[in-house]
Image (cartoon, rainbow, N blue to C red):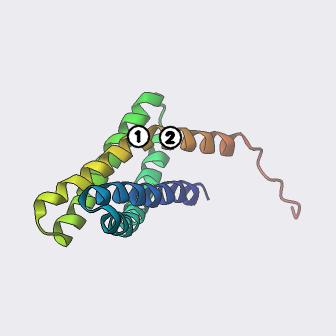
Amino acid sequence: MIWSKLVWWVLWRGAVSGAILGGLFGTFIGFVVGTIYGMAYGAPIGAIMGVIDGIALAIMTYLFWGSPQPFTRFVLSTRILGMTLNFIGVYLYFHNSFQPPSVSFIPPILATIAAYFLAPRYVKYATNLYQSNNSRKPQVNVLS
């Protein structure tokens, strides 16, 4: 259940930030049409990267939670993982989809910046989720 919440948290933020950043990038290329195309391309790639990032971050969170690590190290690890995955994934998508390839460097940089700023919020959400889940008392089985 915690895994699905973590993946969902990253997925919808990936889709929203992809649509917003895609729209902003499209606006610089062509005002109205560029904004529509930017949002149309940004939201799906944001959702796809949201699933990939969400699964990777949920696994990392699960593994990280078992060892006592400082909060700042968790944020740094989340930033490194999220920024790397976003840059590579978005770059591969845009490099194979658009010509000229020189334009394909801008969306991965935007996605990397978004991952940088979302990492501390993800860590805070995951920490609160795990702490609230661990502080609950175990359910009593009424049948036994």
Looking at the rendering, which quadrant does residue 4 occupy? bottom right
Q: Is residue 5 above or below residue 99?
A: above
Left/right placement of residue 94 relative to residue 6 reads left
Image mark count:
2
Looking at the rendering, which quadrant does residue 53 occupy? bottom left
Q: Are marks 2 and 1 in contact (CB under 8 Å)?
A: yes
Percent across and percent down for residue 93 are 24, 66
Mark 2 is surrounded, within 10 Å at the Cα level, by few (under 14), some (14 to 19) or many (20 or more) other residues, namely few
Mark 1 is surrounded, within 10 Å at the Cα level, by few (under 14), some (14 to 19) or many (20 or more) other residues, namely few
| Mark 2 element type | helix
Mark 1 is on which residue type?
A: Phe
Q: Dot 2 corresponds to which residue?
A: 121
Q: Nearer the viewer, residue 120 or 45?
A: 45
| Mark 1 element type | helix
Q: Residue at x 30, y 47 (%)?
A: 112
Task: Find the distance from the CA under tag 2 to the CA under tag 1.
Answer: 8 Å
Question: Which quadrant of the figure contains the C terminus?
Answer: bottom right
Q: Residue at x 47, y 30 (%)?
A: 71
Q: Dot 1 corresponds to which residue?
A: 117
Q: Residue at x 42, y 48 (%)?
A: 60
Percent across and percent down for residue 90 are 27, 60
Left/right placement of residue 101 relative to residue 125 reads left
Name, please, the residue furthest toward the front: 31
Question: Which quadrant of the figure contains the N terminus?
Answer: bottom right
Q: Is residue 110 visible?
A: yes
Q: Nearer the viewer, residue 69 or 27?
A: 27
Q: Is residue 81 visible?
A: no
Q: Nearer the viewer, residue 49 or 2?
A: 49
Left/right placement of residue 109 relative to residue 60 reads left
